[in-house]
Image: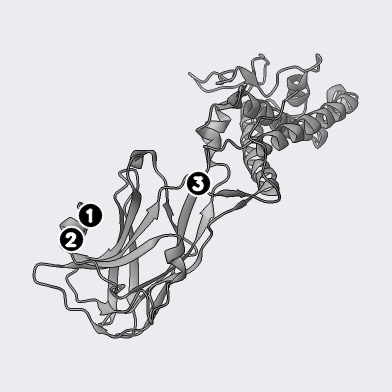
Amino acid sequence: MECLEQLVGLTASACECLNAEEGFDPSESVTGMTLTDEVGGFPLLDRVTASIDCNDPGNIIDKLKAARSEGARQFVLDVARATRKRYHAANQFNGSVGRKKVKSTYVLPSGMDAAGLELRFPLRKGQSFVLDAVYTLFPSAGDFSLTVWSNDPTFTTKTIEVTNSVAGQPHKTDLSSGQIVLPWFSRAMVGEPYIVYRIFRSDGANPSKNEITCCGFVPEHEKHFSAKGFNSSAAKATSEFDCIGSSSYAMGLSLEGFTTCDVTGWLCETKQIGEYDLQDAIGQAIRYAGAINLANTVLHSSKINAYTLLGQEGIYRLRSSYRKSYGEMVEWIGANVPATALDCLGCRRKVIQSTVKSLN
């Protein structure tokens, strides 16, 4: 997450190996912290510069950037683990929408050239539906394009290219290597009752009649979100909130997917946890993680000099201290996810107290 990397600068110190591009300030950060801030007077930057070749194209700036990026990446993974120890993803779904059995052909009314499935999700922070595969059951064989559109103005319209090999028979288009994520929340949709996504053809061809539900059973997805078939003009399919001709038929489509709960997406959007500055806490954690990476650079260096050989004891002590502080910070953040940050979590064992645990 680039937003997290911006919390910590690279270094506020000067050294002969620094070779920053013009206009780049290596000390710039949101929190005022940098990776090489001295703790207890230990000169980490000196150790790092002694472990590389100043003439190497991978100069100290590149080393510092790489350490910070890896530190931020590891921080996100570790916060996710710490969060999942205490919470579980609630209201999860993994299955299909639309039956894979065709009854007959659906004849589009005059003036209608678009037909497909409309999904309506309740606004829920952190939750998404991941479209993993699309089955097409069209009356004719051939290559077709499906449009994925949303009433959320921040969603980028997608196109799915599909091939219907045999007329009337289900053909699977696997999206596992390019899954389409449909978020259930957008700040642009605050105040709306739900967020809508439509997956449809708009070439005027008649779709198939495959049912969304059958025989009096309530499909599993209805416990989480609603789905209905629709037909309209292509222009209205990507502009009007309510489509014409809502239907219990899936219009030749069957979707497969699953819901996810992003337990770390809130980190960039939340400034405070109770009375504590969250950005400062995250900045400290990333500084620790990045400095640990820099310490490893020194310890694994093939350069032989006083800094890399005689200074190893100090590096080991620094790394050990930072690992402990980093772990404590990650656990604190994972234990204190604000109640307003996510709507897709439930307590794993017992109700977590809403009061913020002390950093001290």
State the count of labels: 3
Q: Quadrant of residue 6?
A: top right
Q: Quadrant of residue 246?
A: bottom left
Q: Residues within 10 Å of mark 3 (few under 14, many from 20)?
A: many
What residue appears at the point 34 percent right and 75 percent down from the top-left corner? Answer: 163
Look at the image and tell me whether residue 356 can be seen: yes
Residue 234, disc: 2
The spot of residue 316 in percent (x, y) is: 86, 30
- Three-letter amino acid code at the position of disc 2: Ala
Residue 238, disc: 1
What residue appears at the point 76 percent right and 35 percent down from the top-left corner? Answer: 327
Q: Is residue 24 left or right of residue 121?
A: right
Q: What is the CA distance from the residue labelled 2 to the residue labelled 3?
A: 31 Å
Against 127, residue 206 (above or below) is below
Sooner in the amino-acid sequence: mark 1 or mark 3: 3
Q: What is the CA distance from the residue labelled 1 to the residue labelled 2?
A: 7 Å
- Residue contact between numbered discs 1 and 2, judged by CB atoms under 8 Å: yes
The spot of residue 190 in percent (x, y) is: 36, 39
Q: Is residue 50 left or right of residue 236?
A: right
Residue placed under numbered mark 3 in the picture: 126
| Foreground pick, 140 / 254 | 254
Against 124, residue 222 (above or below) is below
Label 3 SS: loop
Q: Is residue 292 left or right of residue 33?
A: right
